[in-house]
Amino acid sequence: MDCAMHMETTVSRPVISPTHINATASETFTVLQQRMRIVEEQTSSLRDDLIMLDFGEKRGQLETPECLEQPVSQSIISPIQKEIICSGKTDILWKNCEFLVNRMCRLESLIQSLKMNIFRLQTEKELNPQKTAFLKDRLNTIQEEHSRDLKLLQLEVMNLRQQLRDVKEEEDKAQDEVQRLTVTLERASETKKNAAIIEEELKITKRKMNLKIQENLQMSFSKEHEENAYLRSEIMSLHEASEKAQALNEQLTRNCSELNSMLQTVRMENTRIIANHQAILQEEQKMMTKTFQEQNLLLDAAHASITSELQTVQNEKTQLQVHLDHLILEHNQCTQKAQDAEKRTAVQKELLESTIVRLRDELEASMQEKNSLLEEKERLQSKVNKAEKEVAQEKSNLEEELAKNKVFHILFVVMSLHFISFCIAASYISLMRRWVILFNTKM
């Protein structure tokens, strides 16, 4: 952006031509020196802009010569001494200065046109990143042409400066000669004869110097005319290159419009695909949420059923424990009565011992059945039914015998409690198995 504003400011500045300005030769030469310095600075700025555009692969072509990098260090050659020596040749000097100033103005205009072309190419590069390679090749070509032009211009400026240095040296020599002759004239003022001879020699020397200076000026004018013709041909070639660049820019503009339309189509297609993908994802998310909710409901129901069954078992266990406490109390009472009636029950003792042995055998059989039930889980229900029948039969037998003695009733209750605990454990295991199977089926 700074580069663009700098170019616009430079383009908007009018070119000042000092052709019809009434100024001295020294002032005109100073203006010319300033113009040349401005052209050198603008050339360096143009070099920097080309490097910023990444077209400075061969950076050696864009390096500023030492004569342009330090324009301040160069001594300004003033033509005042020349006016003193050869005041009769001011018209030729003025024409030479005006010609140089006009040529520098044309060079400034040429540099401005090159800057505008570079700015336009930079803008097109930013708008068309896909054409960067092609633009880079084209700008490299333009850069090489501009580098050649800059080298020619630099050589021309160096030649002009060298000519000005030569003229300055000749003027210095003439001035030294004038001073020497003046000293000689002062020393020879004692005699008129010596003074006349010195004046004659001085006139001859002045004529020779004027002739030599005139010859040098004519040679410089002829060289400048030749260089002017060469510059005109270079300007024509640059105009042709700018026309080609304009045609290339139009083609790039058309390609940009086509690429923009293609980009818009691709963006619309991407938007549609993204919308479809999001809709599918939302549907899948809803289905997964619904499935998880159903599984949570099933798990909650299973947990509630298991909790209710466990609560029921706990209640039954509590009731049995209360009943057992009551039976223990009755057992204590019966024990007390048994001690009192021990003498009377001596005859019945053998019968009771045989009954106890039989009950122990049945208890061991029940324990074996419990172990078999743990090993054979698939036949658990049938074993439980059979055990219930056996327990019912034994219960009826024990109830008949319990009328005779409460001890048998207590043993029956203890065995019943063990059996009920076993049944509770078996039912809990079966219920857990069904819950695991149900959960695996849902998953």
Image: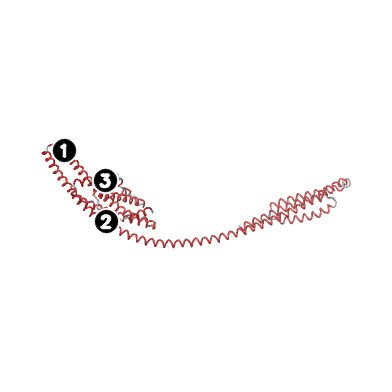
Q: Residue 42, image x and y in percent?
A: 32, 51
Badge 1: residue crowd in 10 Å (few <14, some 14–19, many ≥20): few
Q: Nearer the viewer, residue 225 or 264?
A: 225
Q: Which mark is residue 76?
A: 3
Mark closer to the observer (3, 1):
1
Tell me the kind of residue under disc 2.
Ile
The image position of residue 390, as x and y in percent, is 77, 55
Q: Which mark is residue 382?
A: none
Query: Which amino acid, mark 1?
Result: Glu
* Foreground pick, 334 / 165: 165
Q: Secondary structure at mark 2?
A: helix
- Label 3, secondary structure: give it: loop
How many residues crowd mark 3 within 10 Å: few (<14), some (14–19), many (20+)? some
Identify residue for label 1. 186
Measure how far apart labels 2 and 3 are at the Cα level. Answer: 29 Å
Instruction: Please identify, in this view, whether the residue under mark 1 or under mark 2 is nearer the observer.
Output: 1
Q: Residue at x 59, y 59 (%)?
A: 289
| Residue linked to disc 2 | 235
Q: Secondary structure at mark 1?
A: helix
In the rendered image, the vertical position of residue 334 relative to residue 240, given as above or below: above
- The answer to whether marks 3 and 1 mark residues whose Cβ atoms lie closer than 8 Å is no
Give the CA separation, mark 1 to mark 2: 58 Å
Give the mark toward the camera: 2 or 3: 3
- The image shows residue 13 at horizontal and vertical percentages of 32, 55
Which of pointers 2 and 3 lies earlier in the amino acid sequence? 3
Q: Is residue 8 left or right of residue 441?
A: left
Q: Are marks 2 and 3 in contact (CB under 8 Å)?
A: no
